Amino acid sequence: MSIANKKITAFLGLQSLVLCTLIVLAFIFMVLFDIFYKGIGVLSWDFIFNIPRKGMTEGGIYPALAGTVMVTIITAVFSIPVGVAAAVYLNEYAKENMLTKILRASIRNLAGVPSIIYGLFGVALFVEALHLGSSVVSSGLTLGLMTLPYIITSTEEALRSVPHSHREGALALGATKWEAIKTIVLPSAIPGITTGSILGLSRAAGETAPILFTGVTFYLRFPPDTLNSEFMALPYHLYILATQHHAIEQVRPLAYGTALVLLLLIIILNIIAFIIRKKYTKELVK
Amino acid sequence: MENKIEIKDLKLSFGDKQILKGIDMNIPKNSVVALIGPSGCGKSTLLRAINRMHDLNPDAKITGDILLDGENIMASNQDVTAIRRKIGMVFQRPNPFPKSIFNNIAYGLKINGLDKKTDVKFSVQEALSDCYLWDELKDSLNRSALELSGGQQQRLCIARAIAISPDVILMDEPCSALDPISTAKIEELIMRLKKDYTIVIVTHNMQQAIRTADYTGFMYLGELIEFGETNQIFENPQQELTQRYVEGNFG
């Protein structure tokens, strides 16, 4: 190939990469713009902190917002400690043999299980077998199960990136294995753990299928007051407004407003992750 | 001369591969002992056996005894963390923790519960001074240890090891990743530390062994071929293998 041809190939190669990136960005911006443009009109403190009224044609989304926040907190409280602990066991303690390989592959595959399957499993386990009923705690635990594979996988990844020499350094000073993990390995892994956890939680906060049979409800005038209450949630509320309402055209702005609030909630979650990551990376490197 | 460490018929294998084939060696108190030999001869493996770092590797099988002040540290009833607290280690590549300079030194004190008995600030200052780091770093104790140069990091790792006052310091090619000036500083430090500690150093650099060590052991294919005073090993080796190695005519 002549030098001129090589240059043309390189140029075309680079340009096609740029083009693909632009196509992706274009779609993301179209979706974001559409939701912001159509949703911003109804966004107000009243919309956020008021209950839906007149058959959901007026008023706000407070019970749905509070429900989503609450169910996401339950998800986090359940899945982060359990997931991180499982990852620590798998990466630091479990022997590398066939069993752990199968276990790890299974966990990765769980991340690909359709969310409706988690929903059905949640009904069988939490609602029925454990008698937790159709409630915010059943939904939170179901979402937690769905989030676990993300947290375990990303935590393992983060633990693996901590240099072996740091562990040895701690052990050589007389630390037990657990002390080395607690004081050296885990702090170094926090940025990675945070990223994985927030990605998992963001997905959970926007899910409908797992909560559909386990606790979410069509309409409430108040946020869940106990762990055993049913609750409203933003994604389900959005689904109702967009497809199940008797006056879909009339409530369309409210649907966009709901979508916007859900989106903002997830952006806030990601900002929190960013801050935690920044803080710990700074502590570690600086 | 009183022996700090006595190694008796130490054999070690990883899986089917035998790395150490029965090592007998006495390490006198307050001396510097260098282990030399070609790559793969087992000198680092021997070093890591002394503070039981092989415990981490399920494939490692060890037999034989290592006595520290007459007490067998290979015995199953020995608490391995207590042994490592007495036998510190400095690694081939500097491995400061991703923490501040101060916390790197204080770490060992905290983990061993010594922070309640001693003045941590004073201990940190003392350890840094002993490693010629205090004047350089006294105004930046809160900076990350990762910002230091390689030579400073390695001296910090030595300071971290001596902060908990061990009896023995094991050094696994501590200068192999450092430039000549940093190497000279570490060697100077080793010479000074032997007043208070017993030091075992693995090195590929024969000049380093001559400069720093009182005794030298030459290892080859998992065996200790010859052990004696450094002068004797380098000037009047008794074994042909040793002679060929120290003269650089190997292979």
Image: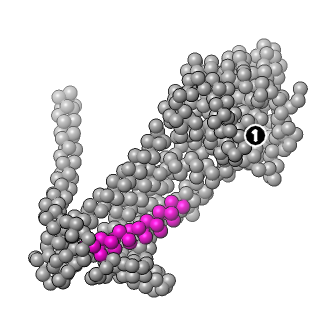
Residue furthest left as drawn: A249
* In the displayed structure image, the side of residue A74 where residue B119 appears, left or right: right
Seen from the viewer's position, the closer of residues B212 and B125 is B125
At horizontal 14% and vertical 76% (from top left) the residue drawn is: A251
* In the displayed structure image, the side of residue B49 where residue A73 appears, left or right: left
Q: Please tell me whether residue A167 is drawn above or below residue B145 in the rendered image.
A: below
Residue B130 can be seen in this image:
yes
Helix, strand or loop at label 1? It is: helix
Tell me which amino acid carries mark 1: Lys
Q: Please tell me whether residue B229 is drawn above or below residue B223 in the rendered image.
A: above
At horizontal 86% and vertical 31% (from top left) the residue drawn is: B3
**Residue underneath mark 1:** B86
Magenta extent: A61-85
Image coordinates of residue A173 in percent, x first then y, are 67, 42
Q: Please tell me whether residue B24 is drawn above or below residue B16 in the rendered image.
A: above
Q: Is residue A68 found inside the magenta-colored segment of the image?
A: yes
Seen from the viewer's position, the closer of residues B68 and B105 is B105
